[in-house]
Amino acid sequence: MTGSTPSDFIRDIIREDLRTNKYGGRVHTRFPPEPNGYLHIGHAKSICLNFGVAEEFGGLCNLRFDDTNPTKESAEYVEAIKRDIKWLGFDWGDREYYASDYFEKLYDYAVQLIKAGKAYVCDLSQEEIREYRGTLTEPGRESPYRNRSVEENLDLFARMRAGEFPDGSRVLRAKIDMASPNVLMRDPVIYRILHATHHRTGDKWCIYPMYDFTHCLSDSIEGITHSLCTLEFENNRELYDWFLDQLGVYHPQQIEFARLNLTYTVMSKRILKQLVDGGYVRGWDDPRMPTLSGLRRRGYTPEAIRNFCDTIGVARTNSVVDIELLEHHVREDLNKRAPRVMAVLRPLRLVIDNYPEGQVEEVEAENNPEDPSMGTRKVPFSGVLYIEQGDFQENPPKGWFRLAPGQEVRLKHAYYVKCTQVIKDEQTGEVIELHCTYDPESRGGWTSDGRKVKGTLHWVSAAHALPAEVRLYDRLFTVPNPLEQGDNFLNYVNPNSLEVLTACQVEPSLAGAKPGSHYQFLRLGYFCVDPDSCDGKLVFNRTVSLRDTWAKMQKAQQAE
Ligand code: ATP
Ligand code: MG
């Protein structure tokens, strides 16, 4: 971790607990994902917090799958979650746990509650239970099954487990208080009947425990000290404490913090799954997704994500973070590690008429001006090049420093060239080729006469460049808060979030570049090799453009 220890209200609580020796000096957290989808950047905040706190205080952090809903969960999600946590750089050691491993124990705890007269089997339908629950302003009504005898409850619960009853016909409920101001305390359901195959326990069970019952007891079983969860569980804390108190077992403390929200995206597995299933994106790891697998494929680094999480910190009030802040951290990190190379996304042929026929030179190019230790490489230069279509204008506006008829520019690392002729397609009038002359005295991009040009263009040598596909991404949604528009968020998916350029040309040093490697394409942004690359065809994702809107906003704010 970084040198200075972060400070926030959770770490303050832990320090105080250590001072008073509340848990015998132990700090033990857990990260408890439900394997019903892939992890997203919001989970990264929770992972950094739980694993980070454990690391800082010499404690432990468990990975626990909260797998109590077999119809939504799968082994694929379990594997993806493990991969993503490892990629972020955290290690749960041998503490990989599953709530489903505790099903037998949880069943025993439920029986214990029944014996204590604290739980009962209820035959009301789901609809009726909701109706009986009351509202925030009105108390609920007691179920007619509430006063079943312990014996009858034990018998019915055992028969629920034995598979005698159909789904939805009965539930086990905690017997608490139908008039509690906290609606969650009004005899919550703790077991439901569900004849479904579980990805780990198979068909062993046909009753499954609910989240509130499972979570606190799993924490207790594992000896968790600080159970950190997001603010929407604040009202569940009373129930968390109730179960542990009634059962008289070891009692961790639940502490809530604000969840991460980011502009221009959505952040819930359930909702992200709709994007995947509806074909709005190419999969969970689509580079437009806020999933960790999507961000990885896009070229975000674990370091950037961790630095981002450190920066946003942990607080008790909900807020929405600008996606530009995340992108800022990505740029900061890639600026240090990504080699600079030249790539042309929309090629325009440029022929140097006075360049010796057949000659090829190798020009020296620095790999990263930020880090001289990254060295230099040779880039082939010849009389036929590609430049970017956008770097030429036949009738340029005032102040145009790039190429135009009669205008001179510098080709990065190479020579000055001056445009002498423009060739157009006879049918369409489209510019298809430029002719130039070069100044042999300007090698390296400087002249002895001190003549200056204002424009510097990137280029590749046509005979040496490699073909590539480049995928450019824009925001996934057209509005900063797609879930708060009042209608279906799917109406706000950005139809132009992906642009695929298939005729790109990249410098030959990129031959064999491995999926996941990062580059800065000069003047164009940071790019990452996509796993779709195969022999002969490189595929790149644009990770982020070069323009740091976050840094700009900060500067403007400081100036005010
Ligand atoms: P989702 O709606 O994405 O499924 P969840 O909270 O239901 O989110 P879990 O798999 O239960 O997903 O989450 C595991 C842990 O990650 C929980 O402790 C949860 O509080 C935390 N978490 C989930 N989303 C965020 C978020 N946006 N910011 C911070 N922590 C989060
Ligand atoms: Mg969930």
Image (cartoon, rainbow, N blue to C red):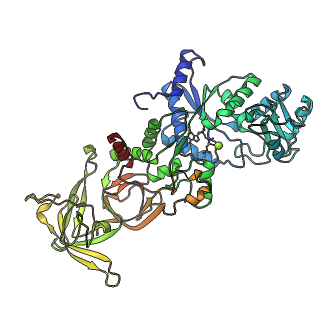
Kindly tell me whether residue 76 is visible in this rendering. Answer: no
Which quadrant is home to the N terminus? top left
Residue 148 seen in the current view = yes
Q: Is residue 248 left or right of residue 382?
A: right
Residue 335 image point, x, y percent: 34, 46
Q: Residue at x 68, y 28 (%)?
A: 221
Is 276 on the left or on the right of 542, as rendered? Answer: right
Residue placed farthest to the left in the image? 449
Task: Assign ligand 1 to one image quadrant.
Answer: top right
Residue at the extreme top of the image, as rendered: 20
Q: Is residue 257 left or right of residue 342?
A: right
Percent position (x, y) of residue 355?
16, 71
| Quarter of the rendering occupied by the C terminus | top left
Quadrant of the image occupied by residue 385:
bottom left
Residue nearest the viewer, comparing 405 with 472: 405
25 or 403: which is nearer to us? 403
The image quarter containing residue 164 is top right
- Residue 199 image point, x, y percent: 70, 46
Q: Position of residue 428 (x, y in %)?
A: 35, 81
Residue drawn at x 71%, y 44% as measured from the top left: 69
